[in-house]
Image (tube, rainbow, N blue to C red):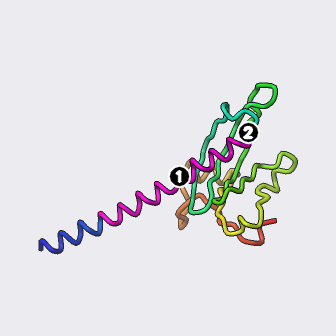
């Protein structure tokens, strides 16, 4: 009985260690993404991030910062792909966002539309484990 108990404790410990490592990796990716996005902004000290999420290869969310006139420009969507590639929402044609580079073809990406907002507030749809939309090579320009 003691052996079974010891094995059960060992399995639980290993499982929790794996969860903590994945969480640490995602936190580290989010920090790298924020630093990268911040460096692209006109006033890096004014940057505000909201709804930032990470999966195994990308970070996505909303960013806002001050423009050259000192006012906030308004939130825009961004995707940071592990490896440093950043894509911001196109001001000219938001329907084309994301206009991902070829190296991002295997990335996963947040869905930035009403269904994503619904997913974030209500939780993933039945049979889905997340609010992330996997990209296919056909969806990459």
Q: How many marks?
A: 2
Q: Main secondary structure of the magenta part?
A: helix
Q: Position of residue 118 (x, y in %)?
A: 61, 50
- Taking the image as shown, residue 54 lies to the left or right of residue 16, namely right
Dividing the image into 4 quarters, which one contains the N terminus?
Answer: bottom left
**Badge 1 local density, few (<14 within 10 Å), some, or many (20+)?**
few
Q: Nearer the viewer, residue 121 or 14?
A: 14
Q: Nearer the viewer, residue 57 or 39?
A: 39
Q: Residue furthest top?
A: 70
**Residue at screen point 43% across, 59% down:** 21
Q: Position of residue 115 (x, y in %)?
A: 66, 54
Q: CA distance from mark 1 to mark 2?
A: 20 Å
Q: Which residue is mark 1?
A: 28
Q: Which residue is mark 2?
A: 41
- Secondary structure beneath label 1: helix
Dividing the image into 4 quarters, which one contains the C terminus?
Answer: bottom right
**Is residue 24 a member of the stretch shown in magenta?**
yes
Query: In the rendered view, would you say 5 is above or below 28?
Result: below
């Amino acid at each position: 009985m003691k052996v079974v108990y010891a094995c059960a404790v060992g399995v639980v410990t290993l499982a929790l260690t794996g969860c903590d490592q994945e969480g640490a990796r995602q936190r580290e990716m989010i920090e790298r993404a924020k630093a990268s996005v911040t460096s692209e902004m006109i006033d890096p000290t004014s940057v505000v991030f909201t709804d930032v999420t990470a999966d195994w290869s990308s970070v996505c969310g909303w960013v806002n910062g001050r423009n050259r006139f000192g006012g906030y420009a308004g939130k825009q969507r961004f995707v940071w792909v592990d490896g440093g590639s950043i894509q911001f929402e196109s001001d000219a044609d938001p329907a084309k966002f994301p206009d991902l580079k070829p190296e991002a073809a295997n990335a996963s990406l947040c869905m930035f539309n009403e269904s994503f907002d619904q997913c974030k507030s209500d939780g993933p749809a039945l049979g889905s484990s997340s609010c992330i939309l996997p990209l296919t090579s056909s969806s990459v320009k």
